Structures are given as structure tokens and as C-alpha cells.
Amino acid sequence: MKINNEQKEENRKKIIRAAVDIFSEKGFRPATMKAVAKSAGVADATIYNYFPTKESILFGYYEDHIKDLIEQLKNIEDFNTYRFQEQLQAVMETSLELYLPDREFVAETSKMVFLSLSSSYRQLKPVRQSFNAIIRDIFDAAIEVGEIPDQVFLEISHQLFWDYYIAMVHYWLNDTSEHFTDTTLLVDKTLDLACTMIKSGVANKVFDILTFLFKQHVLSRMDMFKDKIDTAQMVKRKFMEGL
């Protein structure tokens, strides 16, 4: 029987939720697609129409997490009036709050998803791109109102915040302090330092210094390099002419 898109999405979410419960209880490796399908109430063969492997279910979970994060941020009243640092902090706090009910699952799977250097890099790309879109929007808005200077290395800044996000998630997973106070303090202090550096335009100043050094010590010597290359080519031509 043919099902509509709404039913497909419902089945997809059921599969992911079943996987979260089973992977949390049994661990990722011992769990089977058959067990996930049974728990989700779908046929053994049907599950493969949604997710070809157990690994793909993991990435489906994290893709949905970022979508939920975006929706939660959109629902924060007057989020657009928050300062640059406050918006970045809201991203971290909201994400960790969303992870909290599934903390065991995240602890079991996050390294496989975030830290794997294998073929999973391609599967992680949509998750990373969606997260970077959040950070890009926050940066663009702050630059537009003059809260932070235009960033020379804007794309690198987005990537650094993705790496920072992964580091904070893993710190939180290992945080045994009450109410994860240590994580809250670390996020506060590190974001304060990062935002201070961004507002001061340190990256732009470093770029200006590197540009100056390049012009003074590389471009000024290009003529000397060219002379040496021309000499080498002349030697090569004479050698070839003698054959």
C-alpha cells in the first residue's frame, strides 16, 4: 500500500527513536537493523527504504538534531536582539538541552559520527553544513550592524566554531559536575575569549601582517627568483641543443 509523505516522515522518526533506545541499551555494534525495525513497528525490509545501514540512522538522528536546534532558536523571543556572544551561547546551551534526554545515545555514537575520518565524512556533510549555516547567519548579522568587524577568514571562523562545538559536546558528555556546571563555565569563558578576539579584529590584523611580510620579503625577491629560473632554463636549453 502506498503511503503519503507525512506517513513516511512518521516512520522515519519512529525508526530513529527506536534506534536511539536500542543503541543506548545494547550498544551500537551488537544492535541489529532487524531489532530496530521490530521496535519501530516496520517490516524488516521496509527499514532499508529509509536507512540502508545502522550508520545512516546515526547521521539521520544528528541531522534532525540540527533541524530541531534551528527551530528552537527561531522560537526564542527577540533572539535577533541578542548580542553576538549571547547568540553563540544560546546555540551551545540549546543544543545540549536537546541532547540531554538522549545523552547515553550521544555518548555511544558521537565519536563515530563527529570524529571518524572514514567514508562517514560524506554522510556528516549535511549536518556540518546546517550547523555552519546557523553560525554564518549569526556572524553576518553581527557584521551587518557593526558589532564585529568584517572577517577576512570568515569561512575558517565557521569551521573553527564547528570544531569548537564538537569539543564542547564531548566535554559535556564527560562532565560529572552537578547540573553540568563545569560545561557551562567552560562555554562562558571560551566564548568570551573567542568573541573578544573576534571583536578586536585579531585575525584581520594577523592577515595584514602576513600580507606586509609577503610583499616585503617574497614579492620583492621575485625578480631574483626569476633571474635564477631564467639561468636554469638557459642551461637546460644549451644541454638539449647539444644532443
Image (cartoon, rainbow, N blue to C red):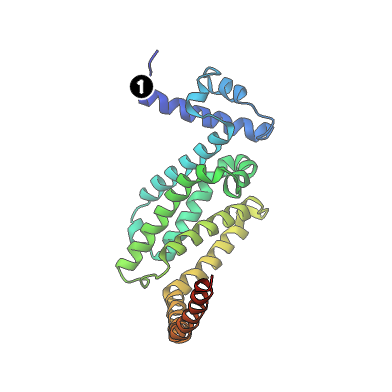
Which residue is pictured at 60% across the width and 25% down the height?
33
Give the residue at mark 1: 4
Which residue is more in the foreground, 195 or 183?
195
Q: How busy is the neighbourhood of tag 1: few (under 14 within 10 Å), some, or many (20 plus)?
A: few
Which residue is more in the foreground, 128 or 135?
128
Q: Amino acid at mark 1?
A: Asn
Image quadrant occupied by the C terminus? bottom right
Q: Does residue 47 appear to the left or right of 74 in the view shown? A: right
Q: Position of residue 222 (x, y in %)?
A: 44, 82
Image quadrant occupied by the N terminus? top left
Q: Does residue 113 appear to the left or right of 69 in the view shown? A: right
Dot 1 falls on a residue whose secondary structure is loop
Which residue is pictured at 33% across the width and 58% down the height?
80
Which residue is pictured at 66% across the width and 29% down the height?
31
Find the residue positioned furthest to the front: 243
Which residue is pictured at 46% across the width and 40% down the height?
64
Which residue is more in the foreground, 77 or 86?
86
Find the residue positioned furthest to the top: 1
Asked if residue 199 is positioned above or below residue 49 in the image, the reply reads below
